Image (cartoon, rainbow, N blue to C red):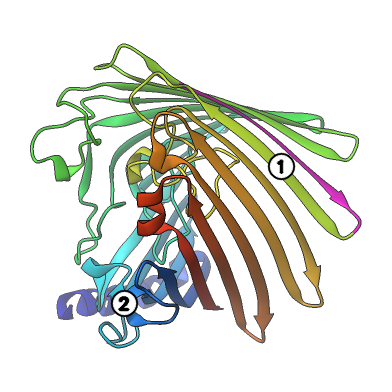
Amino acid sequence: MRKIILSVAVAAMALSTTASALEDIKVNGQAKLWYETNEVASNSLFNKDGASGDVVFKLGMTGKQGNVGFGTTVYQASSMGLEGNAINAYRSAATNEDMFVGEAYVTAPMGSMASLKLGKQELNTPYLFTETWNSLPNTFNAAVVTVKPVADLSLVAMYVGQDNADTFKVDGDVNKQMFGGATVLGALYKNSAFDVNAWYTHISNAGGTAPATAGALPGYKGGTTVNAGWLDAGTKLANVNLRAYAAIFDVEANSDSTNAFALSAGTKVGNFDLFAAASTVSEDGAHSVANVSTSGKKSSLPTEGVYTDGLYVAQNDSVAIKGKVSTKIASTGVALQVVNNKNDSVAVKETTEVDLFLTDKFGDFSTTAILMHRSFDNDAEDTLNGGYYARFIVALNF
């Protein structure tokens, strides 16, 4: 911890001596309280036994020198000593009271049409992406090249080497190796009438070598190769935003591929925003169409809820529907959504979730409250996870 603080201080001193040579320096930050409690099984709301939480401090800086840009983000996550008192566990156990680097990258132009972003960074692709629902986001060591041959088209090529999705080392290093690396190619087109996004992801030696906790995908054998495709397209008809999704996830060690399809529609009626979506995942295959870096926790499907996420709607043989209505009452944003997931193959995936979101801002503080109820068709699963949940997030941004 002392070494980390000293390193940050030295870096700040070095930066101050060269500030005149740097341009467009921007600093941003956030202090955030993340707290969740539940009434499940023997737990009761606001009792420490069913509660978890974190206090997270984030400080980011971007700038450039000539054509070369840089960005860095540091985090400190702490339980504030509340475990065993107000909470049972903190969200990011490996980082409690320690500071680590979440992002550290450089950017540079590559000719007139292309640019490079190299280093530890957040990503947004269908199968490898940064999740922001938790108290801390996951990031990746990657090289990303973006080419814009014409105004409406972007071509993306990236190599992803590692991520820190599961746990965070106290020295800030990513610790989960995508064995053999992941190659991602994307083509993103958007004009005033419609947009189309096509992605291809290849992971070589996904199973890696022992130990399994070093980053092997669950259930994969060493040497396993993954090829995955994704396509989504959207347009607006009258006052309705329509979007269609198609996905394929092929694991070399298995004879069948997992396929998924989804549709979503959103519109505005008076002061209300309405949204509906449906998705289906094939019975065949051996892996979800979800975020590989977090073992499928979240997905890019439009049917996700808070807990009924990639671990449910993106799994084999799942059929999910989602409805959401949102509005604003005075200064408070209010949204209600219902997600239902059916799965004939896995009984514990049969679930219904109802979520109420409340967002507001009080001075410089932004607040989010999420009240949830989960129920299951499987009695055993209902006893384990069915019940009431409440999540509260208070953030001070600067």
Q: Residue furthest top?
A: 255
Give the quadrant of the N terminus: bottom left
Hey, what amino acid is under mark 2?
Asp
Measured along the vertical axis of the image, is residue 157 above or below residue 165? Answer: above
Residue ID for mark 1: 276
Q: Kindly state the secondary structure of the residue where label 1 is placed.
A: strand
The stretch drawn in magenta includes residue 266: yes
The residue depicted at 69 percent of the width and 47 percent of the height is: 323
Marks 1, 2: nearer the viewer: 2
Locate the C terminus by quadrant: bottom right
**Residue 391: x, y in percent?**
50, 71
- Residue 217 position (above or below residue 358): above
Residue at (30%, 86%) from the top-left corner? 82
Q: Residues within 10 Å of mark 1 (few under 14, many from 20)?
A: many
Rendering coords of residue 83 (x, y %): 27, 82
Whole-angstrom CA distance, mark 1 to mark 2, is 36 Å
Q: How many marks?
A: 2
Looking at the image, residue 135 sits to the left or right of residue 239; the answer is left
Which residues fall within the magenta stretch?
A: 259-270
Say whether residue 274 is left or right of residue 230. Answer: right
Residue 179 image point, x, y percent: 20, 33
Of the pair 175 and 384, the residue shown nearer to us: 384
Q: Residue at the location (32% across, 42% down)? A: 295
Query: Is any part of residue 151 visible from this angle?
Result: no
Residue named by callout 2: 49
